[in-house]
Amino acid sequence: MKEFGMNALNHDLRAWMNGVESIRQLHRIQGIPWDKDLGGLLEMILERAKHPPALLFEAIPKARQDMRILCSEIDTIERLALAMGTDPTLGITDFIQAWRRKIRNFQPVEPEFVGDAPVFENVVEQDIDLEAFPIPRWHELDGGRYIGTNDLVITEDPEEGWVNAGTYRVMLQGPDALALYISPGKHGRIQRQKYFEQGNPCPVAISFGHHPILFLAACTDVPVKMSEFAYAGGVISEPVQLVRGPRTGLPIPAYSEFAIEGEMVPGDNLPEGPFGEWPGYYASAQRPEPVVRVKAVYHRNDPVLCGEPPLRPSAGQGFHRSIQRSALIWNALEDAGVPDVQGVWMHPAAYRFFSIVKIKQRYPGHAKQAAVIASQCRAGAYLGRYVVVVDEDVDIYNPDDVIWAISTRSEPENIEIIRRAWSGPLDPAIPKERKGFNSRALIDATRPYEWRDKFPEVNAVRPEFKAELEKKYASLLREVLQRAH
């Protein structure tokens, strides 16, 4: 099996898009207005498509015609594999296993700086007009147009010199102004605050279109003082190519489609929000946030803006995040000594709020041990809510199977509650005055250990007999199932 590593698609978004088009997973759409229509149509497609394609919106009316918008980049295994340089035929469990091995033995690869790059095909330093581009209002009640939903906000620590590249939401606030929201505790916010406390402006570069591996790195809990560029290089086993920003000296991806340089000045704020966030709700009312005053714009010819607007999770977005975080929780369980973990799945419909752990029970309390650790390890602690532990015969990727296990193998009186756990500002179920805390429900949906051998048999076709039938009636099954689709 091919592990994560080098391939020809590791730097250039366009090379990756060509690869996606070659496997018939890129769909081009023309003529959709940027104001609410584009975001609404995107949500409807993702809700209804079992395996949604990557969507490239072109010829967007009432805006510059040279910019295109790419959405739903890595919402299938095949496209995620193309981005990370691994086998696109893997199933979900095998993909998570491969990713677990990669991050367990992870070695960062420092980026490589080059002299010239495609990002500098067009340089604009006078008469900057970001409003001329087709920047969408993604949700009906968003406070404005959001250029940054799949971005790299690049800053440097003023005291220690390490570079951070995080994905934070960026709202258009004029031809050369951007309101930037960064959640408390995030590295970019900490670095910005250091500049402000010194009374200095904070230099910033932002890339708005780039290879998916950079977006994946920016969405990952990379250790403090490790650059996301070094992390991405470690994933693909080769250096990410960067250039120095002419105005700030900050690193910018050499193959960035669209990037800006600017600065944030202490006390210079503009309204930001509301914005539809990943839990499926509008996150907050409008409030003042630091503004980026844009000093230069760089873009390729016919640039591609990458859009990853948070949609209601039932739209099926966030598959790639579930893969990454499931692998982290699985590793945490193993590191804590939990044996015979058969799988972990943070379901995309709820993401951080709902985790499923599959085990082969070995001793009394095994299921509870797994549930407690999954709920409180680094990858599972923030904004969690439910952890369900199931037996090895349950398909954790099939919600019907998981609900069946909960309904037939657990008793409500046995659900464990952990109180005052780690929550955050995006948790819609917690009132504003206590946003920092929530509770966790640990649901043991395994057969009760002490009488599991006497638990009723499942009335499903045994795997061995199913294999016989598959072989015996292969042509009939194929014919019937093709008609069903």
Image: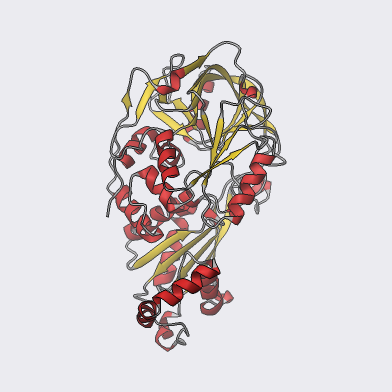
Task: Using residue 275 as the reference point, say whether residue 235 is left or right of it.
Answer: left
Is residue 386 positioned above or below 378 on the image? below
Is 340 in front, or is 304?
A: 304
Task: Using residue 445 as the reference point, say whether residue 64 is left or right of it.
Answer: right
Instruction: Residue 53: give x, y in percent of width and height.
Output: 51, 48
Quadrant placement of the C terminus: bottom right
Is residue 296 positioned above or below 274 on the image? above
Is 280 in front, or is 317?
A: 317
Residue at 45% x, 80% y is: 448
Residue at 32% x, 40% y is: 236
Specify the quadrant of the image occupied by residue 440. bottom right
Instruction: Residue 27: give x, y in percent of width and height.
Output: 53, 44
Specify the quadrant of the image occupied by residue 371. bottom left
Task: Using residue 97 as the reference point, say whether residue 51 is left or right of it.
Answer: right
Is 125 in front, or is 339?
A: 125
Instruction: Residue 296: give x, y in percent of width and height.
Output: 52, 16
What residue occupies the far top of the structure in this picture? 126
Residue at 32% x, 67% y is: 339
In the rendered picture of this protein, how many numbered marks are placed on residues?
0
Instruction: Residue 380: give x, y in percent of width and height.
Output: 46, 54
The answer to whether residue 416 shows anywhere in this view is no
The answer to whether residue 360 shows anywhere in this view is yes
Q: How is the image coloured?
A: secondary structure
Task: Using residue 168 as the reference point, say whether residue 113 is left or right of it.
Answer: left
Quadrant placement of the N terminus: bottom left
Is residue 218 positioned above or below 411 on the image? above
Residue at 35% x, 37% y is: 10
